[in-house]
Amino acid sequence: MEDYYNRKLWHQLTLALLKYVKTGPHNPGHLSEVHKTFVSDFDHRISSLALSSIGLIVAEDIPTGERIEFLESLLKKVSNHPEAKIKIMAKIGSLKIDQGQVEEVQELIKTLEELVNNLGEVTPVHGSFYELSAKYYKVKGDYNSFYRDSLRYLGCIDLDDLTSKQKQEHAFHIGLSALLGDKVYNFGELLAHPLLESLKIACPWIVELLLAFNRGDMNKLEQLQPQWSQQPDLARNEVALKQKCALLGLMELTFNRASSSRSIPFSEVAAAVKLPVDEVELLVMKAISLNLVRGSIDECDKVVNLTWVQPRVLDLSQIKEMNKRIMEWAESVEKTVQDVERQIPELLCN
């Protein structure tokens, strides 16, 4: 690096410096000293994005109480570069959450969201924003927003950059938010994500629980209760969890029936979702109000007439069911065509 510096080869020096700070381990205080005595001498010649990347790594080597001050001084040097600015502001927000300054972060997220939206296309720095946003909503206990932004974060990063422990932690907390979010009724995207593989050995019961919810399987929910009831958040929300699973069971029941046979007796719904018959009407009303299904209730005949079910990301078994229904529909159309063809001569004679 000294040779690059003496020859003023700033691009080559930047690449070498990035490689150096990323390659550890370094003794405590070493990187901060390198930045103070070496990098600060020519940081105005480094690209803003590279400077922000170097600065974020160096920040981890600075005493916790001084990190925000360091990053704020770095922010002034890259203020004209939106992507570098977003990365540093997101890290400042994360540190403020760690220090309990949660309310300040709300305004910061609004500012960052505007900057991110102005970028147009999705870039790697979107991951920094969504990581901060998810962290904020996790602290606030907003399961729906945490689930949404966590999936967005995962869509912006390379999973190989995460350690096994980080993958397990992300998967576990996203799984919890999917179960506890009162607006999350689509588990397909999470179940199809490779991140979930990290939980199949470390915490298999939550994967099984997510699969049970995706199918609306009340029997499996009860079977797994000894495991999930040990998790405090799930135990506190037992009633809500069972209602949510019942709603998903109603969606699955509707999905599995042909559109021509979606007049379902209360007794059949009750058996599918493990509820008393007199609670079926309230369940269907709840599902309609959440726009999970559409239809009507015939209270006199104790029948539910459902015409639509909310689209979801399907797993393999649901795709097979859909394929089966398409084949049945194709056979029905073919039969209709053959019937019409047989009747054509008779119609022409008349």
Image (cartoon, rainbow, N blue to C red):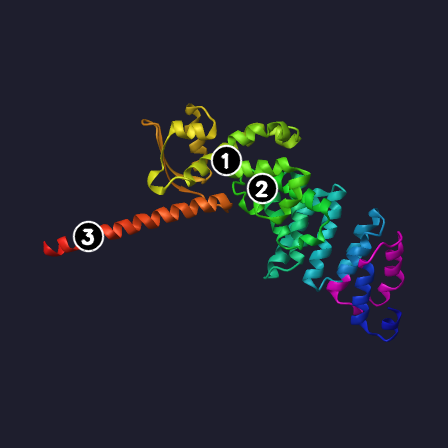
Q: Along the polypeptide, which appears first: circle 2 or circle 3?
A: 2
Q: How would you classify the magenta stretch by its main secondary structure?
A: helix
Q: CA distance from mark 2 to mark 1?
A: 19 Å
Residue at which label 1 appears: 216
* Neighbourhood count class around disc 3 (C-alpha, 10 Å): few under 14, some 14–19, many 20 upward: few
Q: Tell which of 104 and 87 is nearer to you.
A: 87
State the separation of the CA atoms marked 2 and 3. Answer: 56 Å
Q: Position of residue 109 (x, y in %)?
A: 66, 50
Q: Residue at x 17, y 55 (%)?
A: 344
Q: Work out which residue is located at the far bottom of the displayed protein and give it.
A: 7
Element assignment for label 1: loop
Judge whether 26 appears above or below 295 on screen: below
> What amino acid type should be assigned to the residue bearing mark 1?
Gly
Residue shown at 13% from the left, 56% from the top = 348
Judge whether residue 196 is colored magenta: no
Which is more N-terminal, label 3 or label 1?
A: 1
Nearer the N terminus, badge 2 or badge 1? Answer: 2
| Secondary element at tag 2 | helix
Point 63% across, 55% down: residue: 156
Hey, which quadrant is residue 199 in on the image?
Answer: top right
| Label at residue 342 | 3
Work out whether residue 330 or residue 227 is closer to the camera in this orientation and state it. Answer: 330
- Whether the residues at callouts 2 and 1 have beta carbons within 8 Å, the answer is no
The C terminus appears in which quarter of the rendering? bottom left
Residue type at tag 3: Arg
Q: Crowdedness of circle 1 by 10 Å Cα count: few (<14), some, many (20+)?
A: many
